[in-house]
Image (cartoon, rainbow, N blue to C red):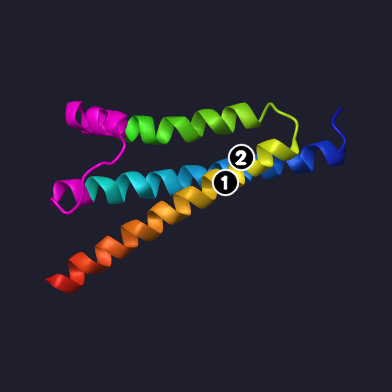
């Protein structure tokens, strides 16, 4: 049986994974919109190649990676370095989404 102290940190990891999944989904949507409307290009060469081959594959990869991470962290004990890594990843996604909002604002103001 799990103690409350071991369940709560794991729930925190899962919640952070879900936040990451939501951020990744928005990143995929905004990136696809920007590419389709010829306002941006995909900076990641691996994701650019996947996008050029198959847009559905692009979405699958963007969504599958955080889902896989949620599955992994659901089985792990909460360790400080895992929390740090998730916080850094979430922070980077937030920065990327801020860039998306910046160029979206420029696109819609310019029209």
Q: Is residue 48 left or right of residue 10?
A: left
Verify CB contact (< 8 Å) between mark 2 and mark 1.
yes
Residue 85 percent coordinates (x, y): 61, 40
Quadrant for the N terminus, please.
Answer: top right
- Please say if 6 is above or below 95: above
CA gap, disc 2 and disc 1: 5 Å
Nearest to the observer: residue 59 or residue 85: 85
Residue on which the image places disc 2: 85
The part of the image, by quadrant, that contains residue 74 is: top right
**Residue 103 colored in magenta in the image:** no
Residue 75 percent coordinates (x, y): 68, 26
Residue drawn at x 19%, y 73% as measured from the top left: 109
Sort mark 2 into few (<14), some (14-19) or many (20+) by Cα contacts within 10 Å: few
Q: Secondary structure at mark 1?
A: helix
Write the start and end of the magenta stretch as one range.
34-58
Residue drawn at x 53%, y 48% as measured from the top left: 90
Quadrant for the C terminus, please.
Answer: bottom left
In the image, which disc is placed on residue 88?
1
- Please say if 65 is above or below 104: above
Residue drawn at x 74%, y 36% as measured from the top left: 78
Nearest to the observer: residue 83 or residue 67: 83
Residue 67 percent coordinates (x, y): 50, 32
Q: Main secondary structure of the magenta part?
A: helix
In the image, which disc is placed on residue 10?
none
- Please say if 78 is above or below 105: above
Residue 25 percent coordinates (x, y): 39, 45
Q: Secondary structure at mark 2?
A: helix
């Amino acid at each position: 049986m799990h103690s409350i102290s071991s369940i709560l940190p794991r729930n925190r990891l899962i919640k952070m994974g879900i936040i990451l999944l939501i951020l990744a989904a928005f990143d995929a949507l905004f990136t696809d919109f920007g590419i389709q409307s010829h306002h941006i290009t995909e900076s990641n060469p691996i994701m650019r190649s996947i996008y050029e081959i198959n847009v559905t594959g692009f979405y699958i990869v963007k969504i599958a990676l955080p889902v896989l991470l949620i599955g992994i962290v659901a089985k792990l004990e909460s360790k400080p370095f895992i929390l740090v890594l998730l916080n850094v990843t979430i922070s980077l996604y937030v920065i990327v989404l801020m860039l998306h909002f910046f160029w979206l604002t420029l696109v819609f103001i310019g029209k």
